[in-house]
């Protein structure tokens, strides 16, 4: 009942693990897979190893969290060994792997994509991290031309479906969505964290995050993520994966009505535990049964006049 | 709210040439073995076990701990916690095995256990006499057996050799709790299995968020997080922690052999 398909890849359910949460090791991904995720997404991977920003890398604020992990990862060549260790098991329990990647320019993105391709079912291009700096992340995703170039370069170099993850921190997300689809994106993930924002400790007068600024995630960003999905759906035809503040099956219904075929859950893991994937799937299924509808019936429904 | 709470340092105690205790101006409710993320604004934020309901005890090993050692009374630090699992008492007779800075969670545990009426024995080890930590606190809880690698005090050798000797004479312990270098703990677990005594170990891995979200301290093969599912693990869970005693990951997630 919850099965869906995106770019020819079939998923047993539409509730995926978002990039950067419980994705640093193969074991962590395996655990989320066992907790009912339809797909798991790796930590964003780059060509070289990176330690990320200094702690604190995360701080809670009203309605969510700010994080500035700074894209820590051991480099794609070492990380693929994490995937080698879990890939047969994930295949057995029918959980797909999304490989999230970042790079400085089209060439770097493409190199990482080629190395990772044999180990994942889909790629997700992170052109949207708001706190990476140095020409990475949102510095690409806020520029339609650069976004187009990155996507088309990767699209030319790999066979598997390419999803592109967008930042909400732009004047017009529709413009970026159109640019990445023109560049060959097979699907769009929206959104990455909002902001960046900051939190200051008033006793010491110091910014709490090591990086001072961090992207906002969690419940408070849901309305913005929903609006982004709605707008993207209105201008492109590729499938959309909604992410941002999702914690319940009812949130998923809302995202589907805005136009998302599937969703990802990140910070929700903190609010409802690692088994949040089971919980959300159960609530979604209950909704569908009670209202006697299928996923395809509610997909994009909020756009009907 | 998962935010650091700012505390003032009331007193600094020099415990050993490399270890200082920072006594803070407030009391914490914690269970022995739990930890907090300590924040030095502008420096970093790292995990440390509670050494009492108002203190942390820090060994100088690198950049952050060096900055801690440079603090003075009256300085401010942020405390975010308590996090993680704790040592749990079981049976009547409990044996603690502590190596080096691993004495921190073990001393808080045996203090609580002896207060609750359990019979406590501790094997405490360090590289040399001056580095033995909390000797008086351990002694007040029950029998204390000291070991030094260089033989400057107590048994000349490792805590695990002493453990073997002790159990050969008297193996009627209901539980072993241990914290120290990972290879020491691995040995303790092997010995515990041989004598059929359950063991609880306190693990260390590179931590970032401390609340089970980022997954940096997730352990192979099942993704148990040291910050949330640990740091204290029952020995039977170690079957699902294949990296125990073999490797750990650094700040980038890259594997390093132990
Ligand atoms: C649950 C737990 C409880 C701890 N309790 C104590 C304690 O009571 N007293 C004490 O002195 N030490 C304790 N530690 C170890 C302490 O966190 C490290 O010594 C400290 O982080 C080193 O930082 P540094 O910058 O001085 O050294 P670095 O040079 O950065 O590192 C020295 C070693 O410390 C480890 N380390 C560095 N950063 C981290 C990190 N963010 N998380 C975990 N390990 C790290 C690394 O493995 C490294 O090999 C504990 C660790 C954990 C995980
Ligand atoms: C701790 C943390 C780390 C993250 N790391 C990444 C990352 O490496 N790559 C990425 O594309 N998004 C990353 N994100 C963003 C999430 O994937 C997601 O887009 C965002 O958090 C909004 O969803 P949520 O409210 O469900 O968390 C991270 C989020 C958090 C909280």
Image: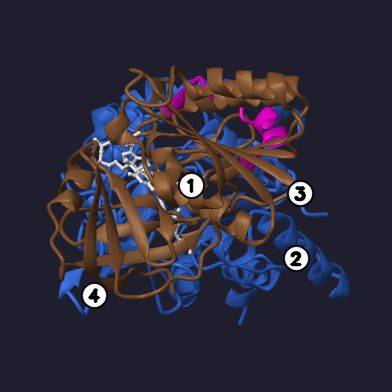
Chain colours: A blue, B brown
Discs 1, 4: same chain: no
Q: Residue tagged by mark 4?
A: A201
Circle 3 — which element?
A: loop
- Label 4 near label 1: C-beta < 8 Å? no
The Cα atoms of the two marked residues, 2 and 1, are separated by 55 Å
Disc on res. A284:
2
* Magenta-highlighted residues: B233-248
Please state the quadrant of the image where ligand 2 appears: bottom left
User: Which residue corresponds to the image point at 44% horizontal and 17% vertical from the top-left?
Assistant: B157
Discs 3, 4: same chain: yes
Q: What chain does mark 1 sit on?
A: B
Circle 4 — which element?
A: strand
Q: In the picture provided, is A112 more to the left or to the right than A239? A: left
- Label 4 near label 3: C-beta < 8 Å? no
Check disc 3: other Cα within 10 Å, few if <14, some if 14-19, many if 20+: few
Q: Residue tagged by mark 3?
A: A3
Mark 1 or 4, closer to the camera = 1
Residue A221 in percent (x, y) is at 44, 73
Q: What chain does mark 4 sit on?
A: A
């Amino acid at each position: 009942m919850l099965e869906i398909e995106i770019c020819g890849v079939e998923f047993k359910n539409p509730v995926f693990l978002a990039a950067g949460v419980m994705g640093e090791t193969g074991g962590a991904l395996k655990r989320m897979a066992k907790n009912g995720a339809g797909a798991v997404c790796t930590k964003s991977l780059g060509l070289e190893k990176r330690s990320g920003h200094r702690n604190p890398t995360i701080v809670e604020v009203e309605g969510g969290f700010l994080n500035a992990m700074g894209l820590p990862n051991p480099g794609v060549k070492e990380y693929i060994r994490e995937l080698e260790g879990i890939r047969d098991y994930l295949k057995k329990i029918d959980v797909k792997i999304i490989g999230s990647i970042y790079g400085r320019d089209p060439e770097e993105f493409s190199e990482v994509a080629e190395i990772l391709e044999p180990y994942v079912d889909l790629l997700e291009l992170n052109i949207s991290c708001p706190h990476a700096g140095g020409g990475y992340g949102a510095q690409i995703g806020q520029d339609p031309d650069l976004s187009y170039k990155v996507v088309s370069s990767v699209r030319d170099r790999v066979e598997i479906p390419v999803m592109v993850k967008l930042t909400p921190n732009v004047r017009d997300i529709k413009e970026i969505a159109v640019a990445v689809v023109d560049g060959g994106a097979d699907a769009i993930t929206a959104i990455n964290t909002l902001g960046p924002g900051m939190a200051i400790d008033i006793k010491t007068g110091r910014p709490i995050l090591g990086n001072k600024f961090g992207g906002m995630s969690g419940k408070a960003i849901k309305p913005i993520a929903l609006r982004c999905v709605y707008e993207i759906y209105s201008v492109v035809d590729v499938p959309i994966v909604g992410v941002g503040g999702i914690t319940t099956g009812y949130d998923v219904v809302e995202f589907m009505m805005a136009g998302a075929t599937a969703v990802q859950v990140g910070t929700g893991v903190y609010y409802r535990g690692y088994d949040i994937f089971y919980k959300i799937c159960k609530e979604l299924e209950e909704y569908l049964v009670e209202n006697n509808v299928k996923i395809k019936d509610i997909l994009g429904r909020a756009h009907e006049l | 709210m998962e935010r650091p709470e700012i505390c003032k340092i009331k007193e600094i105690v020099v415990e050993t040439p490399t270890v200082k205790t920072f006594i803070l101006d407030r009391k914490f409710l914690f269970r022995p073995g739990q930890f907090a993320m300590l924040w030095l604004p502008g420096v970093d934020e790292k995990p440390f076990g509670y050494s009492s309901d108002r203190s942390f005890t820090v060994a100088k090993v690198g950049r952050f701990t060096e900055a801690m050692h440079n603090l003075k009374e009256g300085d401010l630090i942020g405390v975010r916690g308590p996090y993680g699992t704790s040592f749990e008492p079981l049976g009547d007779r409990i044996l603690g095995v502590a190596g080096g800075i691993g004495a921190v969670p073990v001393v808080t545990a045996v203090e609580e256990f002896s207060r609750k009426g359990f019979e406590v024995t501790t094997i405490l080890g360090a590289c040399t006499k001056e580095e033995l930590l909390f000797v008086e606190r351990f002694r007040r809880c029950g029998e204390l057996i000291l070991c030094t690698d260089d033989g400057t005090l107590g048994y000349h050798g490792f805590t695990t050799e002493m453990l073997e000797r002790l159990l050969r004479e008297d193996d009627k312990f209901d539980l072993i709790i241990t914290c120290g270098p990972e290879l020491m703990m691995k040995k303790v677990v092997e010995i515990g299995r041989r004598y059929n005594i359950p063991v609880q170990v306190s693990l260390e891995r590179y931590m970032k968020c401390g609340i089970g979200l980022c997954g940096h301290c997730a352990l192979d093969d099942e993704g148990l997080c040291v910050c949330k599912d640990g740091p204290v693990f029952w020995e039977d869970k170690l079957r699902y922690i294949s990296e125990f005693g073999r490797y750990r990951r650094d700040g980038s997630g890259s594997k390093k052999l132990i």
